Image (cartoon, helix red, strand yellow):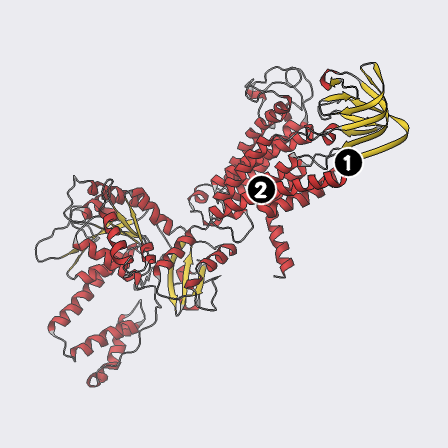
Amino acid sequence: MKHPDFLDNRDFTGEDKKRPSTMSMDSSYQALEGAVKKLSEIASTRHDPRYLQEYIKTGINMAQSAASDHDFTILIRSGREMYRANCVFAPYRHIRKISVFGSARIRNDEPAYETAREFAREASEHGYMVITGGGPGIMQAANEGAGEQRSFGLNITLPYEQTSNHVVAHSDKLINFYYFFVRKLNFVAESDAMVAFPGGFGTMDEVFETLTLIQTGKATIYPIVLLDSPGKTFWLNWLAFIRVELVDSGLISADDLHLIHVTKNPAEAMEHIDRFYRIFHSYRFVGDTIVIRLNAQLPDQWVEHLERDFSDLILPGGKMIQSGPLPDEADEPHLDRLPRLVFPIKRGNYGRLRLLIDRINQTPSRTYSPPPMPDAFPAWVIPVVFGLMGACIGSFLNVVIYRMPRGVSVNDPARSFCPECGKPIPWFLNIPVLSWLALRGKSACCGTRISFRYCFVELLTALLFAAIGWKYADASAGAAVLLCLWTAMAIVIMFMDAEHLIVFRSQAFIGALAGTGACAIYPFLLPDSHVMTWTDAFTASVLGGAAGYAVIRLVIELGKLLFGTWKQHFDVPAPWSLKEPESEREELQLIVNGQPHDWSMLFHRSTDKAVLSGGSVTIDGKTHPPCSVTLRSDRIEMENGDVFLLERLERVEGNLTDIHASREAMGSGDAWILMMAGCACGWQGALFSLFLGSLLGIVQAAASRMGFGRNLPFGPALLSAALIWLLGGSQWWQAYIRFVSGE
């Protein structure tokens, strides 16, 4: 796991990298000041000479103090060990490393040994290097799993002999330490994560030391994973002790437990570490300001969310902002390209800071997905794959659009057939889009012209799927797939409503479920800045669907109340008749005095009726004397009690002087359609769809010269508006809100 922009001059404390203050030497040695300065300038070819100058001054002052020879030995030996360790680690500072701790007494036939080896192997495959104590037991298992090339051994020289394990014994990455404190310093300073297996005092010492350093801000936060073997409870029992004796007693804060992750699964441990560095890169302090470096910029909505939820970490009057590098970061130019999240911080609660980092890594946006997919192949591949998938699915949607309104199963017959002659169509003549173009819109078996709708549905589905793949797939493949399902249902409903004025609730319900699922996976589908977690998004999606359904139902009921009663009187008896549909696109109509009225607009509910009076009626050639005739959705009821089923009648006509009937403002199927739109787009998207859909409906009616009172299929307009929202319309909404609010 290489990081070319990683911290080459890393400071594991994250503190300001201030230049050393000038130390004054003992007065008797001030004459050496110039010589020390000159020597430092000559010897310091890579660093500020003041660093070496201060180191030499420290030694000179110590020589004039009451320090013992042993004190000098500690200074010299620890300095040498730091120098040796730096030489070993320096070539690998661009690679993240995981320190692994555990008992040296674990045998190679115990479960913990194999678990450690498995974890280290997985860490190596994920690009990490492994740092161990270089000894036997868990240390040897981890070095075996990572291999010699990706292993460091930080061995300790003990009064009794401790040999290095066979993996690192002859490695140039083996470092032998005399002092535990220098060894510990290197473990903490060089690691990007720590994984601890069951162990004794030494393991406990490393775990508590690391926790103490992070809890007090003396080391930057990184993942601490306590890994048990399957079926073992070593760390669970340890954690129970911590909770009962430390947290419940108020000796540590409950937030401190956020610094620890306990698991029995090596893969989960590796995932936990990978997730920590998904967006978060590193941080440092500049005075009272924390500068969090990120692998990608956060959306403004997410920053607002973080500022709201972690206001306890921000100093009064401060704000979270995104910026480039601060002037004080000039000593790390290799990190200049990384965006920053900056705010004045209240120090002390590093458990909460760890939670903030976790929340940053949960940002659901396309720019935060790990880079392997875009690096593996060109960006255009994703929309092309989605487009090809859409063309094939569009072919199946044609089957659904043709068969369902006719009551034909979409599965039987399994193979597509010619709509004119009924002969099966072989697969090589049923290639989406291309077959229709190659055959010039004609059936290969009978030469009958095939509607352009078949080609158009396949092409439209391909284009919409490609657009969804381009916009959403690299952010959330799952959300993109669910949005494609939503789009497929939308296309079916649009064309069935346009051709047959039919909306199947089951299709709208499937679309609504797909929309809600997509929002839960990818909350940024919804424009509300307060919707960030999947539970928030799920709730907002359901409320959006309910709002969409309620708005249309309100329109239907108000329209029924205000305009839903049709009463008309004719001074002279006017003719009326029932007109059979002449094509699949039409429906039964009531013709009154030459004016057609669609059946579905008159008989929407089972209780709806139309009462015609003041004239006679002729049914299949038999004339009945003047009487009141009641029309219902499926029958004619005569005043004398006779009933005639419409499906058995061939011709009905008569005359009237009065008509009293109910009339719908719009069909209830539109309510289900706007519910489906609201589930995918939220209540804002539902209102947008209703507004833009109304405009599109007016344009459609004007373009087709549809007369007033005719049945207008509103579903295609609503769903077209919803698709516009999904592919960019939400940005218009947000721009409008900013304009209205004066931002």
Q: Amino acid at mark 2?
A: Gly
Between the C-alphas of marks 2 and 1, the distance is 30 Å
| Number of other residues with Cα within 10 Å of mark 1, as a class: few under 14, some 14 to 19, many 20 or more | some
Residue located beneath label 1 in the image: 565
Which quadrant is home to the C terminus?
A: bottom right
Q: Earlier in the sequence, mark 2 or mark 1?
A: 2
Type of the residue with mark 1: Thr
Q: Quadrant of residue 264?
A: top left
Residue nearest the viewer, comparing 498 with 587:
587
Please indicate, yes or no, whether residue 88 appears anywhere in the rendered image. no
Q: Position of residue 500 (x, y in %)?
A: 68, 27
Using the rendered view, name the quadrant where residue 109 is placed. top left
Q: Position of residue 618 (x, y in %)?
A: 83, 17
When the figure is inspected, residue 189 is found, relative to residue 369, above or below; the finding is below
Where is residue 708 shown, x and y percent of the image? 79, 36
The disc at residue 103 is none
> How busy is the neighbourhood of tag 2: few (under 14 within 10 Å), some, or many (20 plus)?
many
Q: Residue furthest left?
A: 160
